[in-house]
Amino acid sequence: MRIIENANSKKDLKFPLVVKCGHCGSKLEVERSDLYEGELKLLFYDCPVCGKKNDCFEADDLTEDLTVDNMEFPLNFHCSNGGVDISNDEIKEYIRKGVKFFRENPNEYEWYTETGNTAIFVQNFSGDKNYYVIVTKDYYSAWLNYQDIDKKMHY
């Protein structure tokens, strides 16, 4: 038997990586020393032409999986600050969508949406006589990977 690709190991990347700045379009060679860990444990570099932060998806295999043991706030979280500001009328419409969802799905307990710089949660717990609504601007969020103990509980 011959192993063609080991799915359990990170591949060796050949530096420099050739990347394109997502802001100014400059083509760059990026060394490993140019990369730093940021939001959601992704790797980033700062463009020397425009000075803006770029994600380096080309180096994704170097990042660790985010777990409850290695996550740090706010480093490993995406911040919606700077996203499109959502108006009060738009927020009311999203809340209406959440309530409509429960009217059509009475056994569900949570509906939410994230858009622009705003996250909206509507909750409906059994026995309550009202909906619990949370609206937050400039929120932080992260996806936290299941670990073995979590997989056993959910599969």
Image (cartoon, rainbow, N blue to C red):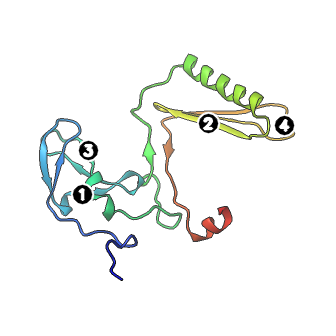
Q: Which residue in the protein does label 2 denote?
A: 112
**Vertical order, 154 against 91 (above or below):** below
- Residue drawn at point x = 27 percent, y = 58 percent: 59
| Residue 35 numbered tag | 1
Compute the Cα span from label 4 to label 1.
Answer: 50 Å
Quarter-wise, where is residue 9 in the image?
bottom left
Mark 4 vs 2: CB contact within 8 A = no
Compute the Cα span from label 2 to label 3.
Answer: 29 Å
**Vertical order, 40 against 24 (above or below):** below
* First in sequence: mark 3 vs mark 1: 1
Compute the Cα span from label 3 to label 1.
Answer: 10 Å
Say whether residue 134 is left or right of residue 45: right
| Residue 128 numbered tag | 4
- Residue drawn at point x = 47 percent, y = 54 percent: 73
Report the amino acid beneath label 2: Tyr
Q: Which residue in the protein does label 3 denote?
A: 53
